[in-house]
Structure formats: structure tokens, C-alpha cells
Image: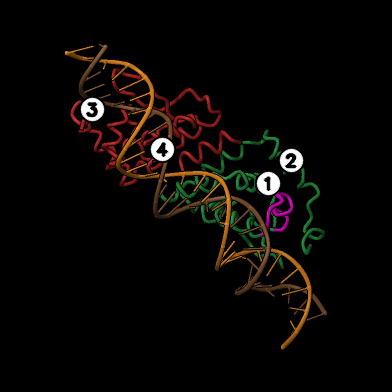
Chain colours: A red, B green, C brown, D orange
DNA sequence: TTCCTATTTCGTTAGTTGGCGAAATGTAGT
DNA sequence: ACTACATTTCGCCAACTAACGAAATAGGAA
């Protein structure tokens, strides 16, 4: 039951939903996500941690960046099924669409180190 | 997005998951659920309210009882899909199984008014 | 080795949530 | 109309959570 609760809690916050929806498009580093969501880096880092601990995303070091992406391993028994649902959900949501539009221009080489 | 958040929040609590899992078996009144979960009536009522507001269950007056049951109307855009998932989830969970076993003996005619 | 950058962790604050008991409400039965 | 019963709402409390800034950590580049 704890694995299911973890997933539901992870998805109970609007900003964490936004993170998941933009990561569906492509992998991103913390400061790119920070830029898109306009939150503090520390807040984003914590949100990412909760999503990762729930089995919904994973991370990978890439030079000086840590890239986060959707985790399709399914190590959390329930995550694959939820991720399948989430792929179809909220794609018409105005805020999600606005976030995704920012993906066109977000670029770690220009926004990090600010 | 608020409808999705409502559902995820509703399912983020172990006791609310338990309520949903026993209601999958059959409709129940508040005092039957109260007996199975061993919580205060007021607590159960509040949990039921959250599940109902999320579109996962509905209620119906039945004499002096209010019966709650799974809501298959799908008025919350996302609830049908989550309910389909939940039908297969957690059925092996020991606590859920124990709760469901109590369904064999719970009887509003003997437990209410105590 | 040192410096710089990206990220994570920590500490604090304000707001939210799950539990309870008490009070209020709804209504069936007499 | 009154009583009894089932439920809901309210008020309180303790625990939890999302936000931030500061400090600590990780590690790449020079």
C-alpha cells in the first residue's frame, strides 16, 4: 500500500504534475525546470526527489548537470500504469501547455549560472 | 488540473484507500465503515466526503442510513480511469484483505446505535 | 589544487490535513 | 410534538507539507 500512497502523494501537488508533464516531452536538468516553473531551485529539487522516490522519474548525471527523465523501469509496481494514464491526462490544460511552450526556448547554456 | 489533484489527494491517505477497497465489494453505511476501520464516525464522514467530492464514490439516503457506493458516473473526468486501476490494485494487501473479511460479519442492524 | 557551478540538504515559516470529541442537523418512528 | 438514531459539521490539536533562503555537497574546469 505504501508504494501506491507514494505515487498518489507525489501527484497531489500541482507543481509536481507540471514537472511530470514537461518531462514527458524531454529530459531536463534542475535549472531548466526551475526556470520554467519559476520556483526556487531547492523547491524544485525536493519535488524531483519525491517524484523519483515514487518511481515516476529517475536522474542521471550529465557533466555538471543532473538530467531528470520519466522512469519507465516500473520498479514501483504501480508506476507504469499511472504513467500510462498521465500520458493522456492534462494535455489540454492551459498551464501545462504554457509550460510546454517554454520548452521551445529553455536552454541550460544560457539560463544556468544566473 | 484541479479535478486530477482532487483524486490524487483523495487517494493519498491509507484509510481512504481502505474505504474505497471495501466499497468495491458492496455499498456500506457510515457506521458499518466506522466499525470496520475502527475510526471515529466523524473521521469516516470526513473521509467519505473527500472521496465523494473527488468523484470516486456517491451517497444515497436509505431509511435512517446513508449508503455510500463506488461512483461510476464519471462526472469527474478522470475518476473512471482511476477506478479501473484501483479495481486491480491492492487486492493482495493484508490490511485490505482483513478489512474485506470483516465485511462477512458487519451488520448495521447490530452495530449501529452503540 | 583551487575555483566555479549545479544540485542537494537543512532550517524555518505558514498553510494543510487526519484524528478526536462535541455540537448541530436530518429524519424516521411513535 | 417528541424521541431516538445516523450522520454531518465544527473546533481543536498534532503532524505533515510546500515555499524560501542559507549552507553543504558534488564534481567539472582551469
**Tag 4 and tag 1 share a subunit:** no
For label 3, the SS is helix
Toward the viewer: A78 or A43? A43
The image shows residue A39 at horizontal and vertical percentages of 31, 41
Dot 3, crowdedness within 10 Å: few (<14), some or many (≥20)? some
**According to the image, label 2 marks what residue?**
B98
**Tag 2 and tag 4 share a subunit:** no
**Tag 3 and tag 2 share a subunit:** no
**According to the image, label 4 marks what residue?**
A88
The span picked out in magenta is B31-41
Task: Give the residue drawn at x 70%, y 54%.
Answer: B34
**Tag 1 and tag 2 share a subunit:** yes
Residue B93 visible in the picture: yes
Q: Which is nearer the N-term, disc 1 or disc 2?
A: 1
Mark 4 vs mark 3: give the one in front.
Answer: 3
Mark linked to residue B22: 1
Q: Separation of disc 1 and disc 3 at Cα? A: 49 Å
Mark 1 vs mark 2: give the one in front.
Answer: 2
Dot 2, crowdedness within 10 Å: few (<14), some or many (≥20)? few
Side of C11 where D30 appears, left or right: left
Task: Give the residue drawn at x 35%, y 36%.
Answer: A42
Mark linked to residue A39: none
Q: Separation of disc 4 and disc 1 at Cα? A: 29 Å
| Chain under callout 2 | B
Q: Separation of disc 4 and disc 3 at Cα? A: 28 Å
Dot 4, crowdedness within 10 Å: few (<14), some or many (≥20)? few
Dot 1, crowdedness within 10 Å: few (<14), some or many (≥20)? many
**According to the image, label 3 marks what residue?**
A108
Amino acid at each position: 500500500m505504501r508504494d501506491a500512497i507514494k505515487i498518489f502523494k507525489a501527484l497531489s501537488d500541482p507543481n509536481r504534475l507540471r514537472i511530470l508533464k514537461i518531462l514527458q516531452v524531454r529530459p531536463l536538468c534542475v535549472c531548466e525546470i526551475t526556470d520554467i516553473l519559476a520556483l526556487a531551485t531547492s523547491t524544485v529539487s525536493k519535488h524531483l526527489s519525491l517524484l523519483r522516490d515514487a518511481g515516476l522519474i529517475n536522474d542521471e548525471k550529465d557533466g555538471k548537470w543532473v538530467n531528470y527523465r520519466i522512469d519507465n523501469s516500473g520498479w514501483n509496481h504501480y508506476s507504469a500504469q499511472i504513467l500510462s494514464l498521465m500520458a493522456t491526462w492534462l494535455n489540454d490544460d492551459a498551464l501545462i501547455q504554457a509550460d510546454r511552450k517554454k520548452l521551445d526556448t529553455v536552454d541550460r547554456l544560457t539560463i544556468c549560472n544566473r
